[in-house]
Amino acid sequence: MKSFIPDINRQETVISIRDLYKSFGGNHVLRGVNLDLHSGENIVVLGRSGTGKSVLIKVIVGLLYPDAGTVNVLGQEVPELGVHALRALRLKVGFCFQNGALYDSMTVGENLAFPLRRNEPGMSRKERDKRIEMVLEAIGLSHTIGQMPAELSGGQKKRIGIGRTLILRPAIMLYDEPTAGLDPITCTEINDLINEVQHRFKTSSIIITHDLTCAKSTGDTIAVLKEGRFIRRGNFNEVFSSEDELIREFYEYNFIQ
């Protein structure tokens, strides 16, 4: 659970989605999604596999384009952005992939340096090294700076992936199944890190998961996606006081079986 009170500004919306539709042929994945992410807030999006959770965050960063609806991120309408404006916006939105997406041929330090060299070419070597050290300290992996990804555990790779996203100091973090495939102890470490990132770096986040422990630990708001629409939202207790069959099945699968 969180050891701090999140500094959420509900008067400032950093992501606003209205009447979002997305289909792939006859597969209607998103069917009128509405969502607001406020400054400083962690929203957890829950749903079964195939309900459109990952499609939603890909639309947010412009990797997929909606069939209908609006997607406003940091004051900009994403589907209307040209290539250069979209690239600039993506620098402010960190996308954490399930597998960490590290370059196997680079050390941890080189993996963290790569986005800085690419996106901030004027940064000095001293400043770059300082940024890398700061991020590694924040994620608790300073000792891995010279290691290769093959030498890391699954949990360490996830942490380094989060660190590489943080290196550019994004305003928004998008986490795609951050605890998938991890043991319970490592899951707890990742959940704690997501909270630490929110607290220390003042980020706003959308966390895609089907892990209720992750949802309960990290989410200020929980939103449940079913058949392409949000059917329930609120804090954890508010959401899981519902008698909706899907919501009860989620709870029982995670905490009873």
Image (tube, grey):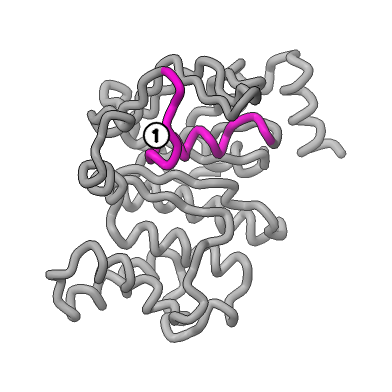
Query: Residue 179: percent from the left, percent from the top?
Result: 62, 52
Q: Amino acid at mark 1?
A: Glu
Assess whether residue 201 is covered by the magenta stretch.
no
* SS assignment at label 1: loop
- Regarding residue 83, the answer to whether it shows in the image is yes
Q: How many marks?
A: 1
Above or below, comparing residue 157 to residue 52 in the picture? below
The residue lying furthest to the front in this view is: 25
Image coordinates for residue 237, horizontal then vertical, percent: 62, 24
Along the viewing direction, whichever of 224 and 202 lies nearer the viewer: 224
Q: Quadrant of residue 236?
A: top right
Which image quarter holds the N terminus?
top right
Res 151 → quadrant: bottom right
Q: Which residues are magenta?
A: 50-68
- Quarter containing the C terminus: top right
Q: Which of the 4 quarters of the picture holds residue 247?
A: top right
In the image, taking residue 219 as reference, residue 200 lies left or right, namely: left
Question: How dense is the environment of label 1, judged by Cα within 10 Å: few (below 14), some, or many (20 and up)?
Answer: many
Q: Nearer the viewer, residue 76 or 129?
A: 76
Q: Residue at x 69, y 15 (%)?
A: 242
**Where is residue 48 shown, x and y percent of the image?**
70, 33
